[in-house]
Image: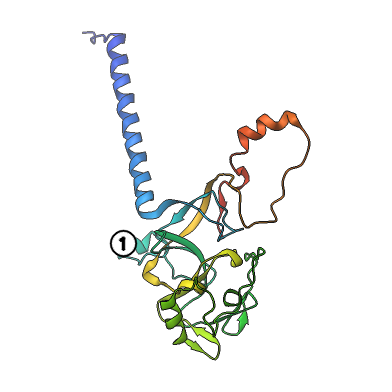
Amino acid sequence: MSAPVQSGTSIAFRWGRHSLAEGLSSLLRTIVVALFLLTFVLQPFLIPSESMERTLLVGDFLLFNKQLYAPPGALSRWFMPYREVGRGDIVVFHHSKPKYLVKRVVGIPGDRLRIEDGRVLVNGVSLDEPYAAFEPAAPNTFRDNFPATVYTDPEVDPEWWKQMQNLVRNGELVIPKDQYFVLGDNRNHSKDSRFWGFVERDQIVARPLVIYFSLSRPSSTDVQQVADDRLGHDRELATKLTGFARWKRIFRVVH
């Protein structure tokens, strides 16, 4: 007895239905993985100000790791990286306004910290800070020599000023338990722990991981930016089409 013969239309229909099911299943898996990464591991973040130049520029879009500093659970400790916040780390943390800020940790619990002429000293040793930028700015004794003995800057939080007086020993700020002292890399143009105080451990939510895109945005503080003065009107259209982004910064790992 011969086997029944299926028509080409029936085979094509089943094949098309099978392919559609596979495609939908693949799309669903991709969406689930993406949602997991964005919810528990990665999150996009846009740099809005110049306070972290030149490490991070205005217009940089970041992905940051939300699990690195999260307390490890019984399951997550086996497959998620985790470590304590360290000196030199760039961190994203909760702040009253705006909701999140990004700065660099220069002092951890137990450190004795002071700043002399803009130079950070921790436990009596000057930090090696190749990332720090010092763009021209008006002199500010409070900003450049910390902790100050006189309340001279109206932008300093008065509550922080009172707290600071109780934590200074021999001209050094002693950082309490579970508190961190953070600065912007653009030292002369950053409102940071010098002005409003410590970041608590439970405020720290993530660490920047990689720049996934960067829009070309002017900086109001970086006077070292050099304009492109080369001649060539034939390049004007190409420049307009490609100049909206900083292509060389894409996929740059953040340090």
Q: Where in the figure is residue 230, as x and y percent of width and height?
A: 78, 39
Taking the image as shown, residue 6 lies to the left or right of residue 92, namely: left
Amino acid carrying mark 1 in the image: Leu
Q: Residue furthest left?
A: 1
Q: Is residue 53 above or below residue 120?
A: above
The residue drawn where x is 54% and y is 84% is 150
Q: Which residue lies at the image location 61% right of the left edge and 44% below the top edge?
A: 246
Residue 235: percent from the left, percent from the top?
71, 31
Tally the marks.
Answer: 1
Q: Position of residue 127 (x, y in %)?
A: 62, 75
Q: Is residue 90 above or below residue 148?
A: above
| Element type where label 1 sits in the image | loop
* Residue position for label 1: 75
Q: Nearer the viewer, residue 6 or 87?
A: 87
> Residue reaching furthest right?
231
Give x and y (percent) for residue 168.
Answer: 49, 87
Above or below for 237 versus 210: above
Looking at this view, name the residue that lies furthest to the bottom: 170
Label 1 environment density (alpha carbons within 10 Å; few <14, some 14–19, many ≥20): few
Q: Quadrant of residue 95?
A: bottom left
Q: Residue at x 34, y 46 (%)?
A: 35
Q: Nearer the viewer, residue 245 or 86?
A: 245
Q: Looking at this view, is 80 or 163 the one in front?
A: 163
Q: Is residue 3 left or right of residue 137?
A: left
Quarter of the picture containing the N terminus is top left
The quadrant in which the C terminus is found is bottom right
Task: Left or right? Give the position of 98 relative to 250.
Answer: left
As rendered, which of 191 and 93 lies closer to the eye? 191
The colour mode here is rainbow
